[in-house]
Structure formats: C-alpha cells, structure tokens
Image: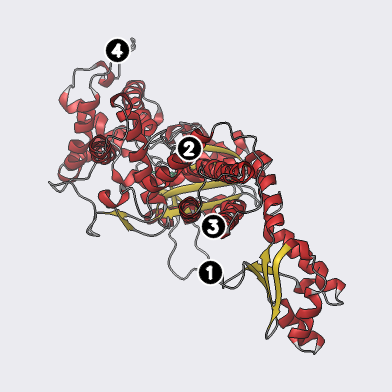
Amino acid sequence: MEKILDIITEKMRKAFADAGYDASFGRVTVSNRPDLCEYQCNGALSAAKQYKCAPIQIANSVVAQLDANDYSMVEAVMPGFINLKLSDAFLRDYLEQMRTGKDFGVEKTGAGKTIVVDYGGANVAKPLHIGHLRPAIIGEALKRLYAFLGYNAIGDVHLGDWGLQMGLIIAELQCRQPGLPYFDPDYTGEYPSEPPFTLLELEEIYPTASAKKKEDEAFAQRAHAATYELQRGRRGYRAIWQHITNISLTDLRRIYDNLDVHFEKWLGESDADPYIPAMIADLKERGFAVESEGALVFPVAEETDKKEVPPCILVKSDGAAIYATTDLATMVQRMQDFAPDKMLYITDKRQALHFEQIFRAARKSGIVKPETELEHLGHGTMNGKDGKPFKTRDGGVLRLEQLLNDMTDFVRAKVIENQIVDEDQVEETTAKIALAALKYGDLSNQPTKDYNFDLERFAAFEGNTGPYILYTIVRIKSILAKYGAWEHLPIQVPANSYAKDLMLAITKLGPTLENALKSSAPNLICAYIYELAGCVNKFYHETPVLKEKDETVKAGHIALLGLARNVLETSIHILGFSAPEKM
Ligand code: ARG
C-alpha cells in the first residue's frame, strides 16, 4: 500500500504540472507546524525563482488544481506555502485499506531478499551477563522488523566457542583431573558420555583459569597450546569441547527463551573452522594474506584513513585461528549457504574496529559480493541508575538472568499488591510486564547511545514505558470485549478531532517501520507506539465510546479502537514482547 506522503506528493506533482509548472516542485512533507496543518508543500517558493514570479501566485494556481475531496483544508499562505489537512473521507478510506490489507498494507520492501542478523554475542562456558542484554534485545527487534518487511531474516547467535576460553578450560581441567582419558594421547576408546563437570563447576572453572593465565606463564602457554590442538582436531579435546558446548547450550537456550529471543541458527565460531584452511590458502595465493612477525595478516589500511587501521590477523604466531579468522570464514559459509543480500552485526560499539577490518578484508578479497551489504550496529553501554558502570553489590558483573529476575520480582510484587489478576495468572502476567519493561526501557533509547538502567522507572505503569503501552492495549481489549464481535466493523469518518489525531497516528505505521529499518533504530518504533498510545487514551478519555447512543457511531469508535489495538500489538511483537489479557 502506498504511503500517504507518496500519494499526496503524486497528486501535488500533477497539480503543479496542470498549473503549468514543473512537476518536480510538488514535493510534500509532514508539516513542521502541526498546529497549522498536517502536511505542507514549499515547492512554490523554489518554483518562483525559476519562473520569475511571486511564489504566492504559483501556490494559488496549484491549489486551484487540487481535488478538494482529498483535503479538509488546503491553503496557499504567504509567502507561498501550501498547507494541507486531509479530509475525513480520505483518512477513512486509507484506514479501511489498512484494516483489511495484510499486515496493514505495509509494503514488503524486502520481498525476495535475505538478511543474516548476527546478534546475541553469547559465549559458551561463560554465563550471559548484562553486557549481553542489548545485543539480544536490539538484534531480536531488528530481525523481526526485517522479517515483517518481507525479508527472509536469518538470526544467528554466532556462539563464541572456539577461542582461548576453550583452551583455558581444558588446561584447568587437566590440572584438576589429570587422570581423565581426554588427556591421554594414546587413548583410543570411547569417551564417557557424561561430562566431567556440572554447569555450576564449569562457571567456576573458566574465571579461575582466566585469572590463573595472568599470573602463571606456564599455564597460559598450556592453554594456548590446548586451543591450538583443539582447533587441529585432537580427539580428547574435541570431546571435552563437546561436553562444554552441550552444557552451555542448554542453559543459553533457556535464558534466551525467557527473554523471548529466538535464533534461527545456533551456529558458532567452531562451525566456521572447516572453511578456514581453504580460505587461508586462497588469500595467501592471491597475495592478500602475508607473513608478518611470525603471524599471517591481511593488511586493510587505506590511504584515506584518518586513524590507523591495523591489519586483520588471520593466524597468530602460535598457529591458532582467532576472532577475525572465524568471522571471515563465517562470511564464506554464509555466502555459500544463504547467499544473503545483507549481513547485519549487532555488538558493543567497542568492537567497531574489528568489524571495519573484517568488512574491508571481505570486500577486498571478494569473500562477499560487491552488492552484499555489510553493517555493524555498535550499541552503547547500559549503565546503572547513577550513570556508572553496572555492578553487583560486591563489585562483580551482574548476570543477565539476575537482572531479569530482579525486574520480575519487582513487577510481581506490584501485580500481587494491586490484585491485577487471579492467583493462577500472576506468573504469566508478571513475566509479560517485566519483559516489556526491560525491552522497551532499552529499545526506546537510540541503540548507539549509552543509557542508565532504572528498574523502577522502566517498570512504571505511567510515562514512556513498556508497561504503559501494555496497559493501553489491555484497556482497549477490555472495551472491545464489552462491545462484542467487532472484527468485521468498517472504519468510519472520524467522530471528533481526537479520533482524527488517532487516525493520523495510525497511518504512520508504514513510514515508521521503513525509517526504523533504514536507520537501524527500533527507538523510532517505540516513539511511534508511545504517540499512538497517547492518542488512544486521549480519544477514549474525550469520547463516550461504549455509552454512545447512536449504534452506527459507536461501531465506528469500536472499529477505530480495534485497528489501534491490532497495530499496537503488531508493533510490540516486532519489538519482541507481548501484552497480557489483564493488567
Ligand atoms: N562472542 C562475541 C563476544 O562476546 C560476539 C560475537 C559477535 N558476532 C560476530 N560475528 N563477531 O564479543
């Protein structure tokens, strides 16, 4: 379905042409003076220069060509602006098309295109911490947005499961239980199917080993050697690796499920491993990869660089493949398996240089096609309420799960205190509100900016919060339930100015989603639904909806609220949360 701005621009172009001027002057924009008009066209001002006459004269003659049925107001005002307000009939027809069209008639700009969205950032053997919240939430929202706009959107968690952390765990485990068969190079039998550690132990082994590496040089070397041998395919180490991955994955899936974050692919750095030897050989042969101080590197600096861009390291002097290597090989794999039109990565912005390097390497070497779009969205940091880095009371890093639990506990207390739902509904309702608070609190900020996490504020039922949006949806649902069957009711002309404001807000769905995608900014969707929710509440407050005596008028109110509800629910679904039945 065409966007309103495009429809009225087209009509304005025709009016310019019919009045004898060039159609290109007919560009319409959303008004920057909403008190005066809804849309405006300033083309007469530029046309005046070309045609050497007064702008107001042009504006007047263009206005005379416009179809009066489209507008409730169309005015040429000094010095030559054209101000517009849409007619009730125009709005009604447009909204009725949105109501009856698939996905509100939003144009599927991504039809036929594939995107890989790489987000989440999880690593095996390390618990998810609060630093993993933003890439999960933002990535999930963007992936759903791409999918809604017609893309074949493939979310991939790209697990960190191939680096030094694996070697550290193997080396530490060997210190603790040297007798295990995994460490005996001559062992040829089957390895035990039960892992030699629990999740809890694993979560302790890694930080211990990581600290030890800094103090104990010999241990650090053993860990590096173990990493290298693991990557080379040493049987016993692969078996340990498999145990670690199995245990971690079960836990990761559970936590991501609780966050309503779902990946189409659970591939990891290790899955890129089979592509590495051929890729390296090819890069060497074509002269892209060169030896430097015992390592193999891919120089990516360009003459125009303002700051130094160091070469991409492909193979370290100890022979191990690293982050950049697996990322490049993953691109090879993705091109081969999915042939994506775009790859979008969501990580902390502190990884910007890494992505700059691998994107350059991928382009120079032709690992991706020239037309394959590459984007790194570097998100800002989530700080504590005081603006300082988020820490637990004892100064440690807060686990993601703990953060979600804290939010859930806070919301549950409110739900129980206000007796919002029956006892058997408390957990489900609480979970939905808590998730909305957490996700909206994050997504309403520009992804690239830092923000302060404020549990009480995010969970408030009033203000620009997730719970407020849910509350608005629940409120509409209860009105609709009181009315009865409403899904078939057509949209009518607005009953009053509040209805018209609500209708105008609804029409912005398509443009909002398109802009949010173009600028990787889910915050635009948040701003949109906040405005929409405001219009709903205002309309409901000012209009006797269920008390209306005239049945036809009442049906019109209900149809409008029904459409608003559907648009709001679809929008929050894109953002990654959902509304309870009662609140
Ligand atoms: N696991 C990485 C980390 O903890 C993030 C992975 C992001 N994706 C990628 N393809 N590099 O920093």
Q: Is residue 7 visible?
A: yes
Mark with earlier residue (2, 4): 4
Badge 1 residue CB within 8 Å of ligand 1: no
Label annotation for residue 303: 1
Mark with earlier residue (1, 4): 4
In whole angstroms, how far apart are the C-alphas of marks 2 and 4?
55 Å
Mark with earlier residue (3, 2): 2
Choose mark 4 or mark 3, whichever is in front: 3
To which residue does mark 4 refer?
192
Say few, some or many: other residues with alpha carbon within 10 Å of mark 2 (under 14 / 14 to 19 / 20 or more).
some
Quadrant into which the C terminus falls: top left
C-beta proximity under 8 Å, tags 3 and 2: no
Choose mark 3 or mark 2, whichever is in front: 3
**SS of the residue at dot 3?**
helix
Choose mark 1 or mark 4, whichever is in front: 4
Position of residue 483 in the picture relative to residue 472 (left or right)? right
- Asked if residue 189 is positioned above or below residue 228 in the image, the reply reads above
Task: Please provide percent x and percent y for residue 483.
Answer: 53, 35
Mark with earlier residue (4, 3): 4
